[in-house]
Amino acid sequence: MNKVFITYNDHSSWGKNTALRMQTLSGLYDFEVDLPYRTGIGKITSETQKRIKTSDIVLVFDLEGEPSAVNEELAYALKVKKPVIIIQGEHPHLNYPNNNNIKTVRLNYYNPDETLHEIARYIKEKFNRKQKSEEGMILALVSIGLGLLAYWALSKPSK
């Protein structure tokens, strides 16, 4: 597994910032992360379709914001039979049932290891023919993202 497509809800600053940080960190370790190319006109772009099609897995941050662009990206990912992991925050916007190609997990901000273990089981199931080091790379990347999100949730001021 060498390439991950990471997407996030429209206007989700934490989803976007986490995805950008994960992309930066992955580049340091010769691992490729692609993000959506959005033009703001509401339709999935051919560039985003290409990025999804060439990825090994799709990771979705369903945090704050509207999921209109993500819904189109997910529909395309399912059309081209990509495995999808949806990580949901406190107030999820996406409603996709778990099936053979989608794993939806709720992020436990106080115990992100629980979420990581659920994701690890799914990755092992989907990529059991791949090398262990490749599974480990995606899990390391996801754990960094979960850690960033947990830090954000725990550090935001209470209302």
Image (cartoon, helix red, strand yellow):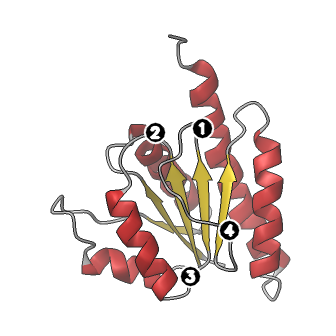
Which sits earlier in the primary sequence, circle 4 or circle 1?
4
> Which sits in the foreground, 29 or 147?
147
Residue on which the image places disc 2: 14
Residue on which the image places disc 3: 82
Specify the amino acid type for callout 1.
Answer: Leu
Q: Quadrant of residue 125?
A: bottom right
Residue 16 point in image, percent of width and height: 41, 47
User: In this rendering, is residue 124 above or below 41?
Assistant: below
Marks 1 & 2, CB-CB < 8 Å contact: yes
Q: Say which element carries label 3.
A: loop
Residue on which the image places disc 1: 149
Residue at x-position 69% and y-position 34% = 109
Say which mark, if any, is on residue 98.
Answer: 4
Q: Quadrant of residue 71?
A: bottom left
Disc 2 to disc 4, how far (Cα)? Answer: 24 Å
Disc 4 to disc 3, how far (Cα)? Answer: 14 Å
User: In this rendering, is residue 100 above or below 59?
Assistant: below
Residue 13 point in image, percent of width and height: 38, 39
Say which mark, if any, is on residue 38.
Answer: none
* Residue 87 visible (yes or no): yes
Q: Nearer the viewer, mark 2 or mark 4?
A: 4
Disc 2 to disc 3, how far (Cα)? Answer: 24 Å
Specify the amino acid type for callout 2.
Answer: Trp
Residue at x-position 56% and y-position 63% = 59
Residue 36 point in image, percent of width and height: 36, 65
Q: Nearer the viewer, mark 4 or mark 1?
A: 4
Q: Nearer the viewer, mark 4 or mark 3?
A: 4
Which sits earlier in the primary sequence, circle 3 or circle 1?
3
Q: Say which element carries label 4.
A: loop
Which sits earlier in the primary sequence, circle 2 or circle 3?
2
